[in-house]
Image (cartoon, helix red, strand yellow):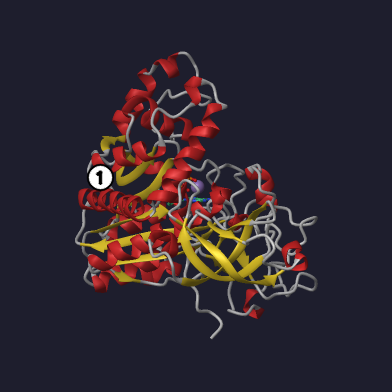
Amino acid sequence: MFNKRIKIKDLLASDQTGQEVTVMGWVRTFRNNQFIALNDGSTNNNIQVVAELGKFDESLLKRITTGASLKITGESVPSLGKGQKLEIKAQRIEVLGDSDAEKFPLQPKKHSLEFLREIAHLRFRTNTFGAVFRVRHSLAFAIHKFFNEKGFVYLHTPIVTASDAEGAGEMFKVTTLPFDNTPRNEDGSVNFKEDFFGRATNLTVSGQLEGELAAMAFSEIYTFGPTFRAENSNTARHLAEFWMIEPEMAFYDLEDNMNLAEEFIKYIIRYAMEHNREDLEFLAQRLAEEEKALPQDKRSEMGLIEKLEFVVNNNFERVTYTEAIDILRESNHNKKKKFQYLVDKWGVDLQSEHERYLVEKHFKKPVILTNYPKEIKAFYMRQNDDGKTVAAMDILAPGIGEIVGGSQREERLDRLEARMDEMHIPKEEMWWYLDTRRFGAVPHAGFGLGFERMVLFVTGMTNIRDVIAFPRTPKNAEF
Ligand code: ATP
Ligand code: MN
């Protein structure tokens, strides 16, 4: 058997010295022709391997370069180096894959995140990305664990959809039609009858509508899958392809929905804090270093770990849109015209500068904003009795802005149809969605959490391109 190895994380966690062990990994550094720092991605900590002088061929030693992969068998011995209990005294070293030191782009030094984005295929091999992607994994796992424990059914909603009614964002078209000689109807429009599906289709922007259908049978479901938005917003918080978690629950009102979202966010953060302590400490350190370069007033008030602890231990602030508008309008920030978009009247959509002001300057904690004007929200949100607002709720997080968008859904057929008419949404195409309001409709609610925004929040990274393996953004789909 080839792979009889111990993972470096497990080896470092054990204190069993005097044993023969085999490790495999990639060389981070090789010092003095003697000390190899080997990493296998199970932890940011390297195992130190000592290749005693004189014991190995010069020709072999030459091949131990940064980035090369090795299989090493040796004895685990107590380490004299600080910060590690044991190291390996090498008996056999096998080079599994060479790495030309002249050409390998990752040097044992600090690289900028921008540079690392250009070599995203190799950046997993850095401490920062090692930590980020292990935390990302843990969060994903915790999400399934949370919903599984609550008895939610994991629903896989389609990636290719025909509905474009959601209006969540610009869609990517999916087609097998040729670009030249595109089949056309007499009036010049594209003849989608000739297309693979016989109709126009897109990549999904959200699994919510399908999620609602399943919630009307299982009571509680969640989705966790990729979503696509062709929005040309080149920001540090938008991707064209991102992962979304969308629970949808029958027999929930807006308050139940908020309670679930808050419990959920706290649960997955707590899980990462328990299972990724070392990685989070590393990322906290990284963030603190990074912020040293910033002027005092731009630095975070809390360290990363402190911030996460604060979030899991405190209630989110719950305020209505109307209250938020009053706060913003009366703020010195607004009066001194420090917002790019000044807040003057009820009904305006909140920009991310407003969201961040509320969270970071005013409340200094996560905020759940509720009951938005119906004009700035989707057709399916439940209409409140005031005739002006809908039972929406967005969760805003420090440093990020909107992290969750959700609502109680309009379960009353007449109200829903009236709203669809007002918003010119074709009811015929949505017959299946409306059917749930015809056959056993119940009060229900749900929300969408942008997974990468959550990963940003937990890791303290600042650009969404650095928390997804291969980001898809305007003019960029490399790898
Ligand atoms: P925003 O105003 O920030 O663009 P949105 O109102 O378009 O967000 P929703 O349609 O409510 O967002 O989507 C639900 C969640 O998905 C958001 O709260 C956010 O966390 C995430 N999200 C939305 N668009 C993107 C995107 N382009 N890239 C990454 N995450 C996103
Ligand atoms: Mn958007």
Q: Nearer the viewer, residue 105 or 243?
A: 105
Q: Is residue 443 left or right of residue 227?
A: left
Quarter of the figure with residue 301: top left
Is the distance from the Cβ of mark 1 to the nearest ligand 1 atom less than 8 Å? no
Q: Is residue 335 left or right of residue 109?
A: left
Q: Is residue 298 above or below residue 355?
A: above
Can I make out residue 388 in this image? no
Residue 45 in percent (x, y) is at: 50, 54
Residue 385 in percent (x, y) is at: 22, 43
The local crowd at label 1, few if under 14, some if 14 to 19, many if 20 or more residues have their Cα within 10 Å, is some
Residue 56 in percent (x, y) is at: 69, 67
At 72% from the left edge and 67% from the top edge, which residue is drawn? 188
Can I make out residue 403 in this image? yes
Q: Would you name the residue on which mark 1 appears?
A: 384
Q: Could you tell me which quadrant the C terminus lies in?
A: bottom right
Q: Is residue 418 above or below residue 184?
A: above
At 39% from the left edge and 57% from the top edge, which residue is drawn? 139
Q: Nearer the viewer, residue 330 or 385?
A: 330
